[in-house]
Image (cartoon, grey):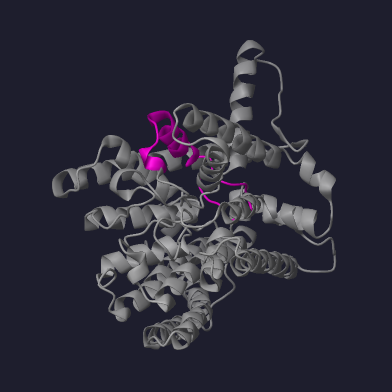
Amino acid sequence: MNQHKRRPPGRRGPRLAVDLRAALGLTGTLLRYLSVSALVPAGVAILYHESPWPFVAASVIAFGAGLGLERVGAHATTIGFREAYLVVSLIWLLAAVFGAIPYLLSGDPQLDRPVDAFFESMSGFSTTGSSILTNVEAVDHSLLLWRQFTQWVGGMGIIVLALAVLPRLRVGGRQLLESEMPDTEGDSLAERIRTTARRLWLLYVALSVTLACVLALFGVSGIDRRMGLFEAVSVALATLPTGGFMPVSGSLAQFAAASQWVVVVFMVIAGINFALVYRTLVRRRWRRATADQELRLYLGILALASIALVTEIWADGLETGEAAVRHGVLQVVSITTTTGFSSTDFASWTTFAVMLLVGLMFVGGSAGSTGSSVKVVRHLLIGRSLRRELRQTLHPEEVIPVRLNNLVVQEKTLRSVTAFILLYVGLFVIGTGIIALDTAVQGPSLSPFDAIAAAATTLGNVGPGTGVAGPLGSFASYPDISKLTLAGLMWLGRLEVIPVVVLMTRNYWRVR
């Protein structure tokens, strides 16, 4: 008797649950569009009488690679969430590879090693702002603008990621998706997503242009003589995506107090849910903004941490008067929003001050902002979940729903928040261990706190660390394994961990 089951007519053999052709095809399309971004610094290179060919070559290479991937998925079906996880993970990885090409072709001695070029590029596209440059002023203007532009493109891209993919993760993208969708029943979901993304992109561009104009005006009027047009544009390209790269050494320390205060305001805005910013600034719905519980907690954290830090540095005699207030507020806002700017060498401050700033690396901005790290809404929900568990210990039969903005949060959402935080902490511990072990063998000599800060600042996409990688230093002296580990943490942190971790599970690649 034949024991083999007969295969239904017309049915092919086993297939992966994920449609690789569709995922690669969409990745190719996105890479092809991304390739055009390299033409912007090419124009700047011509303006400054520098070579545009590294950018033109990078654009051509990326366009060709994207076209090739598109052909692979030419006849593929529409992608689902399985494919979307692979697409967003691949495109950020390929973007970093693409962004490294101009660095390698430029001939700059600080960026001529593939590991260093990849690190700098990943730091830009992930809006981290960590750098291996030790002499920023020695780099060509066009290459510096490319550094800034990669942050701006990455920050804009994360808005689309939040709209299109992160709704599946229930906290993060979903809040942005549901809070600003146009109420048009006749429109398809895809059309509403496109409409929302277009509005938020326009807001993103408008805020960037506004900041650049204000800073340039400071330069022209003499309020900030160090602020030229190139510097003003560069700061704007780093602030709204909460990036942190700067075209000069010392970050914001060289610029006037007025410029620093304006940047603080825009950093605060960049750390707010962009849909909420749109409703507040464009639609004038102020009441909904003031009632948003995540926004209130976000602003409360900034206020309390600023008071604590200003008090500490003033009492210790590090700064006094307006300077103490400005440095304290700027560093708190910069670290919490994961921008990573600095107005002074905070790594030389007291132990309490530095520990406070490193602790803020785990806070992050609001969901739906360009900020990264854990995000305020997750802290809010995990806190309320813990409070419920404590209360149910005393009243086991009481039903206590967790609410956010007066809406009941589903239990599966709370589980996803818990899973994210556990994964985040686990990756942080693993990253810290690899860095500590690698640097202990190959150097430089790091303290345990330096290793902790390095992992925290890259996983949270913040930027500066402590020790040799402090706000006035760089990661140039870290060994290659540590640099690749840090770049991996940037990648994981920017994509909010889960889309990448899902790819590492057996179930994702199962055969159906």
The magenta segment is 346-374
Choose between 125 and 408: the one closer to the eye: 125
Can see residue 2?
no
| Residue sitting at the far front | 222
x then y, percent, for residue 467:
30, 43
Q: Is residue 367 inside the magenta stretch?
A: yes
Residue at the image point whose x is 53% and y is 63% from the top: 235
Query: Can residue 218 be seen in this snapshot?
Result: yes
The furthest residue to the left: 441
Task: Locate residue 440, reporting x and y percent.
Answer: 17, 43
Q: Nearer the viewer, residue 376 or 19?
A: 376
Membership of 207 in magenta stretch = no
Residue 180 appears at what percent x and percent y? 76, 57
Identified at 50% across, 51% down, the residue is 496
Q: How many marks?
A: 0
Q: Residue at x 52, y 33 (%)?
A: 309
Which is nearer the eye, 360 or 489? 360
Q: Quadrant of residue 307?
A: top right
Q: Is residue 101 above or below residue 357?
A: below
